[in-house]
Image (cartoon, coloured by chain):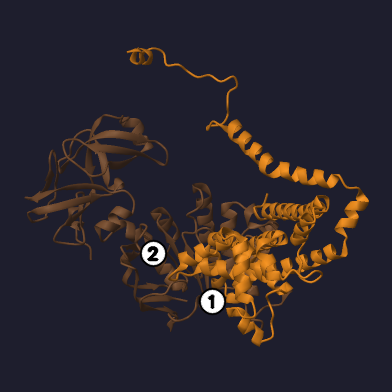
Chain colours: A orange, B brown
Amino acid sequence: MSAPSQAAGAAPVRRFAGRSKRVLPGFGLSLGISLFFVSLVLLLPLTGLVMETAGMTWDQFWFTVTDPRVVESYKVTLWTALAASLFNGAFGLLLAWVLVRYDFPGKRLVDAVVDLPFALPTAVAGITLATLFATNGWYGQMLEKIGVEVAFTPLGIVVAMAFTSIPFVVRTVQPVLEELSPADEEAAVSLGASDLRVFRKVIFPSLWPAVVTGIALSFTRSLGEFGAIIFIAGNTPYVSEVTSLMIFVRLQEYDYAAASAIASLMLLVSLCLLFAIHLWQGRYLRRLEGR
Amino acid sequence: MSITIENISKRFGGFTALDNVSLDIPEGKLTALLGPSGSGKTTLLRIIAGLESSDAGRILFGGDDVSDLHVRDRNIGFVFQHYALFKHLTVAENIAFGLESLPRKQRPPKTEIRERVNKLLEMIQLPDLANRYPTQLSGGQKQRVALARAMATKPRILLLDEPFGALDAKVRKDLRRWLRALHDEFHFTSIFVTHDQEEALELSDQVVVMSHGQVEQVNEPAALYARPESRFVFDFLGHVNVLEGNLKNQKLTQGDAWVSLPSVQGDQEAQLYMRPHEVQLARSPSAHARLPLRIESVSLIGSEVRIELQPEGWHSNELWEIGMSHNEFARHAPARGDLWYAVPDIGHLFTNAQSQPRTVDWHYPATATAHP
């Protein structure tokens, strides 16, 4: 019976070399694991990418990334991603608005379905969309009658991009919309403002940073989309090839250096975009909170 | 513009927020809607504003039925508890919001709007803060801006929902005084909701006490405090000391305590309500009452010493509270744990038979009458 006698004696007090100012322990350990994991999964592969590219001379690099077929793919990717994310900005705002402001049967189901593009393998989405929009598919048949061709054209790329990145807008706008105080709107109405004016002057100013962030996230996601696009785009050189496909093509040609050159350029653009959003958002929020 | 409330009822699911409420709000007066939370006071204010619809009844502004008018057409100013300032607009833009919302034909030109805003900023004593954003203001300043914003369009009626509820005590007092002064200058018809009885009694011309979706009593502050008509109003307005006992042979008894009630007949359960200032403390019982109490705590802060007492040999749901002047306190030096006797001057007797109290005055028995 040693335990009771120990307990009866002076309780052992654990002392640390330095006195911690934090209440919860484990800061060092948790931060260490997180950083290690981030390095292993994100930073190391990216470094590898840059290393691979570094084997090229500037001339080689420039020649690879300015190949006319590749340049055409930049143009296609940029305008389709822009179109898709702008469409998502409008439609995602509407969807978030409906989900937050109204109660209707099946609301939770719709809310769950919004995340489907995240959960679905993009290839599955691509095949499904291609089937639907093909000239003999459900949507394709109808669209053909009004002379619109979606499958195997750049328009198909827009559809695939919009599908895979809609959750970004909905999920960034939704919480902001939920936190809007009904009193602000009531105040505006009691001051005689019309519904349109309430939306323009009271609701939208609080909302648009979230909308812009959602659009930008949706845009960066669309820039890199691959799986969903290749099935519906038709992949005609100079017409409907996206940049991510070009990387794949170079890989298939066993030209690893060229693939990583294009990839690193895409990486640079995405990173710049993300940082820009982050900086802008921080500044905007600071002004709003009066700091 | 006077306001008439006719038979307003409102239910939220199974909860009755307002039960057939009728009320007259006089023109140019500051009226307080006072009641505990859940009494329906805020709902009533929101129905008057048009922010909520009633299930039944009518609202009239100066004789015109406005029940079916939209908020934006009722021409009211509404001030919210948490200010509801537009945080991406400056103070000046906030104040100008109502003017700029006017239809193009009625909208004053830009220079006039700017002038009006400057005048309002001066009125709320914040002329230097025109270009600040709401987050850069203190709570008291925010509420002033909210008030200026509500008054910018010169509404017929000003409605305030717990306007000082989110402010600390000192600011609240300042703002209260300021609002009263403002009201005396402009004489708009205003209604404010509060759960703070002190605020209601100090600020208003007329107090409407509400509980459980019904109006308990309407009167001027002084009259309301002096002559509450029901147990609820008694309990809700300030502290009250209660002796609950058996009334027999003109004497109300409970345990060791009794109070003689000359000229009160009957043999029944009864409660005697006494305000802290209607009772005095003495070292020995008087001829007409024996109420032994032990001192529980003494609070010296304020113009009067407030003494809390625990009944000795009888029972009361709440501690008794009796005020004593600092002079008297210095003479007698009552200390915690001492046994003292309460001597009532005036009491208000409730019996189960009557809903209204009967006032008993031991010094001038002739004036003891029931309420009209």
Q: Secondary structure at mark 2?
A: helix
Instruction: Please state, as top left, top right, bottom left or bottom right, where the N terminus of chain A lies in the image.
Output: top left
Task: Indicate which disc, 2 or 1, sits on the residue closer to the N terminus.
Answer: 2
Vertical relation: A92 (above or below) B337:
below
Residue B237 coordinates in the image, percent (x, y): 33, 54
- Chain letter of the residue beneath label 1 in the structure image: B
The residue that appears at 68% across and 66% down in the rendered structure is A229
The amino acid type, in three-letter code, at marker 2 is Lys
Disc ID at residue B273: none
The residue that appears at 74% across and 59% down in the rendered structure is A244
The amino acid type, in three-letter code, at marker 1 is Arg
Q: Is residue B338 left or right of residue A27?
A: left
Residue B229 coordinates in the image, percent (x, y): 26, 61
Residue A69 coordinates in the image, percent (x, y): 84, 65
Residue furthest to the right in view is: A59
**Closer to the camera in the image, A245 or A101:** A245
Residue furthest to the front in view is: A253
The residue that appears at 49% across and 48% down in the rendered structure is B169
- When asked about the image quadrant of residue A78, the answer is bottom right
- Chain letter of the residue beneath label 2 in the structure image: B
Residue furthest to the bottom in view is: A145
**Closer to the camera in the image, A261 or B176:** A261
The reply to whether callout 2 and callout 1 are in contact (CB within 8 Å) is: no
Which residue matches tag 1?
Answer: B72
Vertical relation: B319 (above or below) B205:
above
Q: Determine the CA span between mark 2 and mark 1.
A: 21 Å
Vertical relation: B106 (above or below) B254:
below
Which residue matches tag 2?
Answer: B41
**Closer to the camera in the image, B314 or B289:** B314
- When asked about the image quadrant of residue B236, the answer is bottom left
- When asked about the image quadrant of residue B16, the answer is bottom left
Q: Is residue A28 left or right of residue A258?
A: left
